[in-house]
Image (cartoon, grey):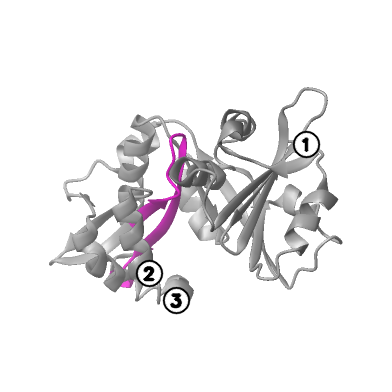
Amino acid sequence: MIRKLTKDDQELLMALLRKEPALNLFIIGDVENFGFEQDFMDLWGEIDPADGRIKAALLRFYRSYLPYADGPFDVEGFAEIIRKDNDIHMISGASEVVKAFDGEINFKQVKQLYFAELKEMNNKISESFSSAEPIKKATVQDVEAICALTDTIEEFESSRNGSRTSLRKTLESNTGRTYYMEREDKVIVTASTSAENSMSAMIVGVATHQAFREQGLASRVMAQLCADLLYEGKSLCLFYDNPHAGVIYKRLGFQDIGSWTIVNM
């Protein structure tokens, strides 16, 4: 049986999501930050009739849907909910879950990313952020300086228009943090988190000015960011599709735990 979830279902839902907190950081973060009674967000759960547990969940966040299940689930039931939405933009989630909707929903474009996780402190991180150069934690006042760097990075071109608004909102809401390094009063390296919750956080926005690449600076900033979050008891995760970037992350101890699929409607 699939039904809409309410705040009374939170513990049952978290029991499901805690099994893979990295894969579920978006749902966990949205529940912790926004609850169950928002017009931009809905949650459905498939209830196991045998024991009453929630065996699968579906999140709508604005125009995007994110399904999760830890085993077989009612694909057709979730697909029916999604098909009723005439304003849907995207479905994303663990690849094996999203793949189950193939044939139930028509996809226009599919993108697959590697999904990596870092769960504990290690010597690679300790050694990487040992540096005489100060690494700073950004405030809202630093948004323009940080975006002045990301504006120059080709990989960030698609999000350039909303980057300032997005970063400012993340910092103001404490749903993420940004660390950076500067020289001559200009930001040359930055790394951020988003979707932070009580258990995990997503690494995003790793960027180095072209003139300062291949010096290990991004690894230093990322290492400091990761160390601080790990000391808080949170695991780190990230997406990547660039094999070179994957090598950098794995040097810090990140391990691939699966793949993430994004489909546009």
Label 3 neighbourhood size at 10 Å, few (<14), some (14-19), many (20+)? few
Of the two numbered discs 1 and 3 on the same chain, state the one appearing first in sequence.
1
Identified by mark 1, the residue type is: Gly
Dividing the image into 4 quarters, which one contains the C terminus? bottom right
Q: CA distance from mark 2 to mark 1?
A: 37 Å
Residue 125 x %, y %: 36, 38
- Tell me if residue 126 can be seen: yes
Q: Which residue is mark 3?
A: 157
In the rendered structure, the answer to whether residue 31 lies left or right of residue 141 reads: right
Give the number of marks. Answer: 3
- Residue displayed at 31% across by 58% down: 190
Dividing the image into 4 quarters, which one contains the N terminus? top right
- Asked which secondary structure carries label 3, the reply is helix
Q: Nearer the viewer, mark 1 or mark 3?
A: 1
In the rendered structure, the answer to whether residue 143 lies left or right of residue 77 reads: left
Residue 140 within the segment the image draws in magenta: no
Of the two numbered discs 2 and 1 on the same chain, state the one appearing first in sequence.
1
Q: Which residue is mark 2?
A: 163
- Asked which secondary structure carries label 1, the reply is loop
- Asked which secondary structure carries label 2, the reply is helix
- Tell me if residue 216 can be seen: no
Identified by mark 2, the residue type is: Ser
Residue contact between numbered discs 1 and 3, judged by CB atoms under 8 Å = no
Of the two numbered discs 2 and 3 on the same chain, state the one appearing first in sequence.
3
Tell me the magenta residue range.
Answer: 191-211
Residue 223 x %, y %: 35, 44
Q: Can you tell which mark lies on residue 71?
A: 1
Q: Residue furthest top?
A: 51
Q: CA distance from mark 1 to mark 3?
A: 37 Å
Q: Nearer the viewer, mark 2 or mark 3?
A: 2
